[in-house]
Image (cartoon, rainbow, N blue to C red):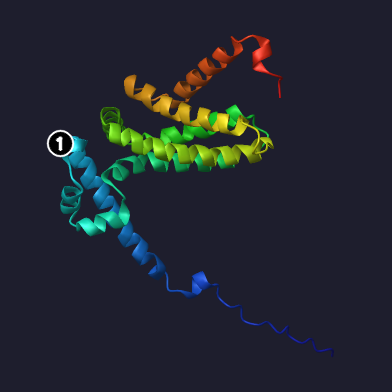
Amino acid sequence: MVQIEAPNIQPRAKPFAEAVPAGVENIKARKQQVVRNALSSAAEKLFLARGFENVTVEEIALSAGVSRRTFFRYYESKEDVLVERFSQLGEDLLSELATRPVEEPALLAIRNALVPTMEASLVEPEIIRDTVRLLRETNALRRALLERRSRLEERIARLMIERIGSSSQDNTPMLLAFITRALMDTVFNAWYDHETDDIAGLVDELIGRLCGVVMAMPAEFRGAEN
């Protein structure tokens, strides 16, 4: 009888993530998120109740149950607290845009990334309305938001360079990044002024108007079709 030797199977080493007890490496991150959420919630309530200019960092920290020093571990300024919500929206839009198929025309990709991002951001409409109102009323907040928007535009432009196969010498990616950011801001303002649940319809209407303005230009100014 022929004997078949059993294969010499070595025990597989556990990946590091499996070797570390579940949850241990995330405890600190969870605690940090609890503090960040507490500061954000406290700041929004104070801003809405008393006005942005009348609230201090110390009052936000006290209301959240932490020290002033702890506040500055999480935020650079009180402006930072409020614009963080819109900064996260920018991150979400960037992620959606990065997942769009390469074969989609640039403006269509922007549209298809913007619609789900805006729909997800408006699940708490009252908070968003109050935040937009504060942004409209407070110059310091608008300046803080514009700084972050500029950084977002640069990142979108880099993504567009890859999408359209352009170079850093071509202004098209930066133009598309500006259009993306302008559409996002315009959608927010249009939604605020004419509150609607049809975000896709709102985005499509704005893009349609943009295309109409472009098509109204003489052919020599529109450039060659891609």
Q: Secondary structure at mark 1?
A: helix
Residue 185: horizontal and vertical position, in percent? 42, 28
Residue extending furthest front? 169
Q: Please give left or right for residue 168 compared with residue 40 in the image.
A: right
Image-quadrant location for residue 156: top right
Residue 53: horizontal and vertical position, in percent? 19, 37
Q: Nearer the viewer, residue 182 or 201?
A: 182
Q: Given the image, on which type of amino acid does mark 1 rest?
A: Arg
Image-quadrant location for residue 66: bottom left
Tell me if mark 1 has few (under 14), some (14-19) or many (20+) residues whose alpha carbon lies within 10 angstroms of its own. Answer: few
Residue drawn at (67%, 11%), measured in percent from left and top?
219
Image mark count: 1
Residue drawn at (51%, 41%), measured in percent from left and top?
94
Residue drawn at (32%, 44%), measured in percent from left and top?
80
Residue 161: horizontal and vertical position, in percent? 63, 38
Tell me if residue 101 can be seen. Answer: no
Residue 111: horizontal and vertical position, in percent? 54, 29
Tell me if residue 11 can be seen. Answer: yes
Q: Is residue 160 above or below residue 218?
A: below
Residue drawn at (47%, 25%), measured in percent from left and top?
200
Q: Nearer the viewer, residue 13 or 86?
A: 86
Q: Find disc 1 in the rendering and name its residue.
A: 50
Residue extending furthest right? 1
Q: Please give left or right for residue 110 compared with residue 132 in the image.
A: right
Q: Please give left or right for residue 115 compared with residue 158 in the image.
A: left
Q: Is residue 168 above or below residue 27?
A: above
Q: Quadrant of the C terminus?
A: top right
Q: Please give left or right for residue 180 compared with residue 168 in the image.
A: left
Q: Quadrant of the N terminus?
A: bottom right
